[in-house]
Amino acid sequence: MTALPRRLRRRLLLITLLLGLALYAWQLGSTGLVDETPPLFAASARAMAETGDWLIPRVNGLPRYDKPPLVYWLMGLVYALPGQEQWNPLGTWAARFPSALAAIGVMLALADTLLRWPQPPFQAAPANASPPAPERPGLTALTAALAFGLSPLALAWGRTAVSDSLFSGLVALALLLCWQAYADPARRWWLPWPVLGLAVLTKGPVAVVLLGITLLLFGWLQADIGGLWRRLRPLRGLALTALVALPWYLMALHHEGRPFWDSFFGYHNLQRFTEVVNRHLQPWWFFLPVMLVASLPVSPLLVVGLTRAIGPLRRSWFPTLPQPPAASLARFAASWLLAVLLFFTAAATKLPSYWLPATPAAALLIALAAQTAWAGGRGGGGGRPWERWAWDLSLLLVTGLGVAFLLAPLWLPLINDPEMPTLAAALDGSPLVPLVAACWLLAALLGWLCRRRPALRLLALQLPLVLFVPAGLLPLWSVGDRLRGEPVRRMAAALQREGRPGEPVAMVGVLKPSLHYYGRRVVLYEGIGVEGPINLAERLRRERRVGQQPSTPEAQPTVLVVIDQTTSRAPFWRHLGATEIETAGVYRLWRLDRRRLEASVAQLRRNGFASDWQAPRPERY
């Protein structure tokens, strides 16, 4: 299996890059930050750029120990560029840049791997025979890149200002470099390990665990753990990983002490694995449907690819046919996907984003499964019947989604989002929904027309879906941002316009960190419970954080409160006689007399209510 000529590889990688830019860079900064987590990342990174403190991320006057600093550093470097108001007015281009960069990088890495080491169909010959030559390896590389780039999960997190896409991208690059070093003795053995160190600097030691489980599974399936060990030299490699990652951890621990240790290692790593946090309780099989949804609309091809890549097992629980190293990418991808599945299934806390590190492996399996179905000639008869049924089922899924969007007027009125009460009306009659339907129906039509042209059918299905992202998905995202995000930005602008010197700010009910990000003010956040007024009164008197000093009602008689309309009707807020300054969407901006707040709080205490703001909360902001 010879690599494609260099000139052809460059052309195909350029096409992959352009497709990646269309999916992940187009209009990257055209919408605001999506609450709740992205504004915390963005505000921390912007604070680094503005204060020059690049060691510990800080947000809303408090240290943020949730994640290591690499994603903040990358965001902060873009925030440090001049002229932000002109080219990055919403702040989202800088904040989403690492996620988009990582997603595009994964697309290029997948394509480059398959272009340099074309893989045979799954019906491979034994190790002592020459594997059959792949058909159209350039198309396989493109379809693998697009299978990842069009994954709903990759699209969602690749355009979101959090660390998941960067972490998954670095893990993917480290794993692909590991396989390349195993497959080709000419490749440098040490390349994966510094990349793994960067992954540890993005989300912690879980990167080492995922890589270790993947390599163990792969070595077992290949019956070649010794060969894998000799090629990758993991002890020396982990030393390189430590050289990259450990210095920041040691400096952070020295600077912050016990709070950093308890929060980052105790809560965000150990406790998330052993206990359910933030009510993210899910059944053990949670990631099985997530796996299928993340690969839509070609999830049936993923099942085929995973089944064929693992292959039959003997009673000794080893593969029947060890594969030549250079032809083992499918088996490696299966080990990679299973490692993510096993590890996060064992974790007590389960979130859809935890599946993201498996999406590049799924993309490889999908593309190679499609390549296998191509074997056997023009009629596509080389595949088994159930493999052909998997392709037909994928086409039915695409067709069904297209018809569902076409029938949107029937189900749009069922949408009921309290934060976007006018969403259904905004979409009803809009040309966007029919345009989305047209993209999906075109994909289905081309897929059916090319059904007997195996070399083109997967790519024919994917290209209209590439068009769907800038033509349909991003405009729909803009509608959601206008209805859900813009009211918060209007409240933030009102805070800057109406706020008096030293006047504190609070947000009650629906808690939006983007208010802090866009308002550039420390915001005291309180929920919908009756303890809210008591907590707010006490925090104004006693809580101290950077940018917020304690004060008495005599020294600072008012507080600005952003409150949603549902919470504003609660009796313990409604009777405070606040002055309403501005409204936007479901939000109200009040100026509240603190003396009246104190009087109401005294009555609540007489009724048996007490504050709870000092209770330990690992994820406070």
Image: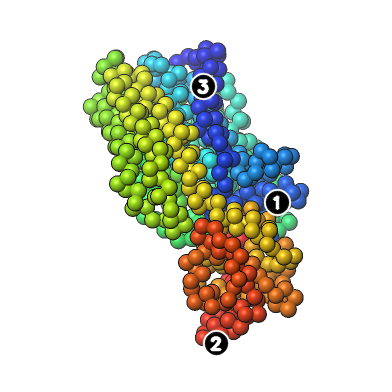
Dividing the picture into quadrants, the one containing residue 376 is top left
Q: Is residue 10 above or below residue 499?
A: above
Measure the alpha-carbon separation of dots 2 and 3: 70 Å
Residue 365 in sight in this render:
no
Callout 1 secondary element: helix
Place of residue 83 in the rendered image (x, y in percent of width and height, measured from the top left): 72, 40
Circle nearer the N terminus (2, 1):
1
Number of numbered markers: 3
Circle nearer the N terminus (2, 3):
3
Seen at 29% across and 25% down, the residue is: 448
> What label does residue 92 carry, if any?
none
The quarter in which the C terminus is drawn is bottom right
Direction from residue 597 to residue 154 in the image, left or right: left
Q: Are marks 2 and 1 in contact (CB under 8 Å)?
A: no
Give the labeled residue for mark 2: 606
Question: Most extreme residue toward the left, as rendered?
Answer: 385
Measure the alpha-carbon separation of dots 3 and 1: 37 Å
> What label does residue 15 carry, if any?
3
Measure the alpha-carbon separation of dots 2 and 1: 42 Å
Seen at 41% across and 45% down, the residue is: 427
